[in-house]
Amino acid sequence: MRARSISRRDLFLGPSARTTGGICPPGTSPSSLHACTGCGLCAEHCPTGIIGLIDGLPSLDFSSGECTFCGACRMACPEPVFEPDPVIRFPHAAMITDACLARRDVACQSCGESCPSQAIRFRPRIGGPFVPELDEQLCSGCGACLQVCPVGAIETKPRDMEPADV
């Protein structure tokens, strides 16, 4: 275990005051990350390089890659942060916003071509390019579609949210 420097805030408030800066690695939750020591082994062993430490806690950044659910982060972690069983989907799903090129009459299917679970299909329409439709049940939340979208029109949302709440 490596010693890590802590801020004055963490010194007085303790590690429970830390929060995740974004999406937790697969098989973790914000509450399980309280046991994280911030050693960074999960980030070092991630083959796609999407894990980074924010305020000493692991967080995923899908702008540079996707999660393949390989489990390298789980196997490298010396702390009881990860669930014991492998995880194959996140508690979030992708969401295609109105900034999508295909919804603005520009032909683009990059998200559908990159989706490993084929959760994004394209519906034909008269007089315009095919429009993406996302099947939330098939979506693993891996982030493959986020990195390839040329206009950043794809976001993540918790699975339990209704479309009206977004």
Image (spheres, grey):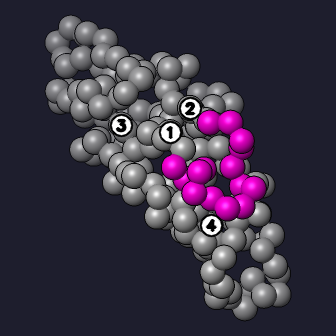
Q: Residues within 10 Å of mark 4 (few under 14, many from 20)?
A: many
Is 78 part of what is drawn in magenta? yes
Per the rendering, the mark at residue 69 is 1
Q: CA distance from mark 1 to mark 3?
A: 15 Å
Mark 2 near mark 4, Cβ–Cβ under 8 Å? no
Q: Quadrant of the C terminus?
A: top right
Q: Is residue 31 magenta?
A: no
What is the span of residues highlighted in magenta in the rendered image?
Answer: 72-86
Q: Which residue is mark 3?
A: 145
Q: Nearer the viewer, mark 3 or mark 4?
A: 4
- Point 82% across, 87% down: residue: 12
User: Dot 2, crowdedness within 10 Å: few (<14), some or many (≥20)?
Assistant: some
Q: Where is residue 162 shown, x and y percent of the image?
A: 65, 28
Q: Does label 3 or label 4 sit earlier along the sequence?
A: 4
Q: Residue at x 68, y 36 (%)?
A: 85
Which of the pair 118/1 is nearer the observer? 1
What's under tag 4, amino acid-wise? Leu
Residue 13 or 34: which is nearer the viewer? 34
Q: Position of residue 89 (x, y in %)?
A: 57, 33
- For the point 54% across and 65% down, which residue is it? 41
Judging from the image, what secondary structure is the residue with disc 3 in? helix
Crowding near the residue tagged with mark 3, few <14, some 14–19, many ≥20 C-alpha atoms within 10 Å = many
Q: Amino acid at mark 1?
A: Phe
- Identify residue for label 2: 88
Q: Which residue is mark 4?
A: 57
Query: SS at mark 2?
Result: loop
